[in-house]
Amino acid sequence: MQQALLDYTLYLADSALILGQRNSAWCGHGPVLEQDIAITNITLDVIGQARSLYQYAAQLKGGETTEDTLAYLRNERDYKNCLLVEQPNGDWGQTILRQFFFSCFQRELYTQLTKEKDATLAAIATKSLKEVNYHCRWSSEWVLRLGDGTPESHTRLVTALENLWPYTGELFKAADYEIALGLDPAPLHKNWFSTVQSTLEEATLSLAPLTSCYMQLGGKTGVHSEELGYILTDLQYMQRTYPGCDW
């Protein structure tokens, strides 16, 4: 049970960290200054969530493990983040849609975890939920703006939807450690799908062509796309080049 709790905590932490690392590439490159600042703040939020979770994971693992060793000194197959968050930024539309899908999922997940018997996870979820509610609102507004905007913005969001939808199924497929903890994410799908579908419909986007597409799995158990390797090359460079350095 202790190992399952550690694996689950790492899954939550890794997903938040990798999304934060992806989003950080937009710092200084957003379409307008206000939105550049907004996505940078969201990045800080999810990295803050990752830090809290890594600190708890380090406590669970014990020994000389720290939040830094978990973030910077594990290999690709040790990461348990969902595949969705490691997908490329692409254009602004793809970044927005990725954030929307994941934030809506986090909202359902953290709501569930606020009632979790593990007091630490419940506390982290309660604090994070306040941030995630904003992330959902911000990203949904952009989905509407782009989907129901110009022909160009609509086309770009259609492409983003085709690229990212196959990675959403994994969010609701329980890994062994989730089953061991009795934290099956499958029941979260109904509310998540309802929110996503209604927003996409308002944005004049249709899920009909994608309802039977194959869903990619593996990230939650350490089987990743090649994208994660490139992310970790940047993320872990300093710690691996200068072992033990202090910031």
Image: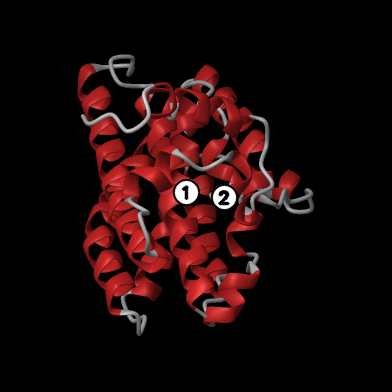
Q: Residue at x 59, y 40 (%)?
A: 76
- Position of 12 relative to 203 (above/below): below
Look at 65% across and 65% down and name the residue there: 173
Image point (31%, 37%), residue name:
43
- Earlier residue among tags 1 and 2: 1
SS at mark 1 in the image? helix
- Which residue is drawn at the image coordinates 66% and 42% (left, top)? 224
- Say if residue 149 shows up in the picture: no
Q: Nearer the viewer, residue 58 or 221?
A: 58
Q: Relative to 72, is 119 above or below?
A: below
Q: Find disc 2 in the rendering and name its residue.
A: 82
x and y percentages locating residue 114 in the rendered image:
31, 75
Q: Is residue 71 above or below residue 226?
A: below
193 left or right, relative to 104: right
Residues 145 and 116: in front is: 116
Q: Amino acid at mark 1?
A: Ser
**Residue 159 at x, y = what percent?**
63, 28
Q: Are marks 1 and 2 in contact (CB under 8 Å)?
A: yes
Which residue is identified by label 1? 15
Q: Quadrant of residue 46?
A: top left
Q: Is residue 39 visible?
A: yes
